[in-house]
Amino acid sequence: MAEPGDARVLRRRRATFGAGRGGSLLPGKRGSEAATESRGSPGERRREAGEEAREKGKSDKQKRRNESSADPLCCHRAQESLLSSASGYNNYRGVLNWCVVMLILSNARLFLENLLRHGILVDPIQVVSLFLKDPYSWPAACLIIASNLFIMVALYTERQLSKGSFSELVGFVVHCINLTITLTFPAAVVLAVPSVTPVGGAFALGLYTILFLKLYSYRDVNMWCRDLSSAKAKKLSRSLSCPTGLAGEHYKVCYPGNLTIKDLYYFVFAPTLCYELNFPRSPKIRMGFLMRRLIEMLFFTQLLVALTQQWMVPIIQSSMKPLEDMDLSRMMERLLRLAVPNHLLWLMFFYWFFHSSLNFSAELLCFGDRQFYKDWWNSETVTYFWQNWNIPVHKWCLRHFYKPLLRKGFSKIVSQSAVFFLSAFFHEYLVSIPLRMFRLWAFMGMMAQLPLAWFVGHFLRGNYGNAAVWMSLIIGQPFAVLMYVHDYYVLHYRQDTD
């Protein structure tokens, strides 16, 4: 019978065809391995894989075209709306541009309305009068010059401590007295001398507050160095500092070699509140960068003054009557009207101070650490905002106040509350004393951040938390401004008007 023979021939033909498709019939190797070897080098295999992927992509596109054209009556497929989070769409550049255009147009309308109603109110001479009542009497400038006395007392005390002439207790007492007078002396002068204007007093007290924080850090770091042996002091000087030059051209300073007038005054003028024996340094001054920051400082200074006179002052003046009559609806309308220019001026001030001014001083002093702020505008919690919008103050609080409280056994909640309390004290110190009235609006506003931070952190997340942070900034500040202006008006001008 011939059928079994035909079956064997047919099986041999199928086996030969299958071996040809496998690429090899070598004994001891599989067909895929032999095919891999026959493809050549890894580069050739990668090129072949890329070509296969492109061909596969083309085939998939062609397949989709064929599917779409297979049924001419079909025009739908399963897909999400672009504004749905499930769609994966994230290109909202046009929406952002639209928001910017609408913001510009709305503010342009308000500015034009302001000009038509009030005329041009910008007066450079009035700016000078905000700092000086008498051109021959400069009490705020004299206060700033007198601050050098407190700097020299701190340096003298540290030198005596390094030589052993003062005990640690005596040095601690001298530093406490010096720091206490640093805060109380300018406050007493501002309150006692009538010729000190509110703006000049606020400027002087702001500089004294910065000096207080710097001298506190100066005292702490030198005390840490003294608490260690000479070998550990050198190790601490390295751990408290960063590399001082890109090419290593600056030598390291070790305790007590840092106790010099040059070193202390460099720290006083440097854009930082935390003292180090060796600051990170930039290799040279970039004149182009320096001039750009200087032009920005001058431009934004003039713009801030002009917008305050032209935009803020008329709104504040028109808000006095509703505040006196306690007309809640009119008060709310004035608050919302004041919120836009106040917030715009606050943003300009942030850029002027934290970017232009601090970068200018850092470039002039070759100060290397330029991180004066982080992405606070993306804050989803109130705590994140306060930690990232003012990095110099945050570093000081973390290094010299928050962590020492934790080391003494206090909980994180208590330590964080203490930091907010300290910040609230200085906010009130910088507002109430120059205005010569104590209403605690700034203090209560800062302390209100604690329950707000708890609420936002527990109940709002993501975009909702970020919106809550922005709302607190836009609404909270003009409310405090209106309260202080109203109280100042009632205290100084109400009686004269009556």
Image: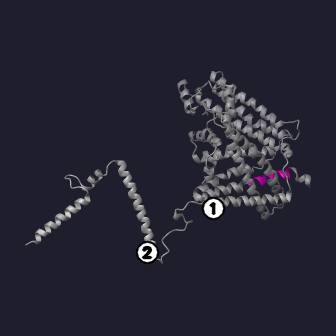
Q: Are marks 2 and 1 in contact (CB under 8 Å)?
A: no
Which x, y percent locates residue 361? 69, 37
Q: Which residue is mark 1?
A: 95
Where's residue 155, x and y in %? 69, 27
Residues in magenta, as a range: 477-491
Disc sitting over residue 70 in the figure: 2
Q: Which mark is residue 151?
A: none
**For the point 75% across and 45% down, which residue is it?**
299
Q: Amino acid at mark 2?
A: Ala
Residue 412 sits above or below residue 333 on the image:
above
Q: Nearer the viewer, residue 242 or 151?
A: 242
Q: Is residue 254 left or right of residue 141?
A: left
Q: The residue tagged with tag 1: helix, strand or loop?
A: helix
The percent coordinates of residue 455 (x first, y second) are 61, 57
Mark in the foreground, 2 or 1: 2
Q: Main secondary structure of the magenta part?
A: helix
